Amino acid sequence: MEWNRARYGNDLLKLSTLMKKYDSDKIFKNLGKILSVTQGKLQGMRGDVLTVEASGIEVILKKRIAGTIPCDLQSITIFFESKSEFDLSIDIDLKDRILESYNFQIEVKGINDAGEHYNAWHLDRDIRKPNSKKTRLDHPLYHFQPGGNKLEGKDIMGAVFIGAPRLPHPPMDVVLGIHFILKNFCSTRDYPFFDKLFTNPDYQDIINRAKERMFIPYFKAFSENCTHEDYTMKNVFPMAV
């Protein structure tokens, strides 16, 4: 399951081209420029450590998302940033090659006549020190968690945000993050042109390669013959043990 920076960079540029082609409502702002910068920095790196970082991605939705509270939001803006740093010298069959600087943040801002309303989620990598004590709460190795520093300083009334629960989820990079936003926030009933994107062979290839990088090593933890040191059932899904 090996891959290289050239293939990764080409996928970023191709994804940028496809999004420009199919996003007829232009809900993604500056995505092409951001992915181009990400690709340029990636190609300029040398050595085994490879950093894929993108920030400032914005998605502006003017159509209501079912189940949204408050129900009268006139627009929703999704802010997304991602950093995945890999050490390609690590044997991916034995150890997680994603480094501790991993970052995946989704911030949501909704606007109505009463003002601005916020929510946020982040996908975390649990940083584990050798011989560290057992955690007092469940800490899956990778987990989705509500709130976080994106809500700090925000005027939030009538809601409670705590650090729980931490929901097990495989790691995602910027490619899968964009796919995640499309699949969870952009209904194809409201944005039917994305159906054509999802069936585009080039797009499918890009997403499949991203899944091979991020998902397949993680899901080996669920196999009977797992010998991985990081991706074990105890680490990725503590409640199952």
Image (tube, rainbow, N blue to C red):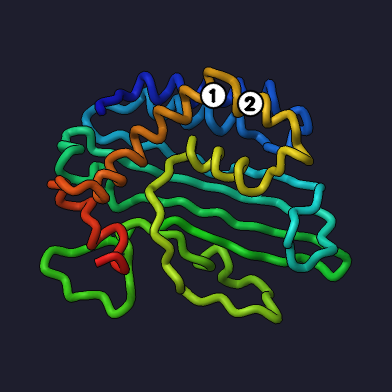
Residue 229 is tagged as: none
> What residue appears at the point 54 percent right and 18 percent down from the top-left corner?
201
Q: On the image, numbered disc 2 is attached to which residue?
A: 197
Residue 109 falls left or right of residue 145: right
Rendered position, 59 above or below 140? above
Rendered position, 78 above or below 193? below
Mark 1 / mark 2, whichever is N-terminal = 2
Q: Nearer the viewer, residue 113 or 235?
A: 235
> What residue appears at the point 40 percent right and 54 percent down from the top-left corner?
169
Image marks 1 and 2: residues in contact by CB distance under 8 Å: yes
Q: On the image, numbered disc 1 is attached to which residue?
A: 203
Q: Nearer the viewer, residue 177 or 183?
A: 183
Label 1 neighbour load within 10 Å: few <14, some 14-19, many 20+: some
- Name which residue type carries label 2: Leu
Residue 135 location (% of width, % of height)? 26, 75
The quadrant of the picture occupied by the C terminus is bottom left
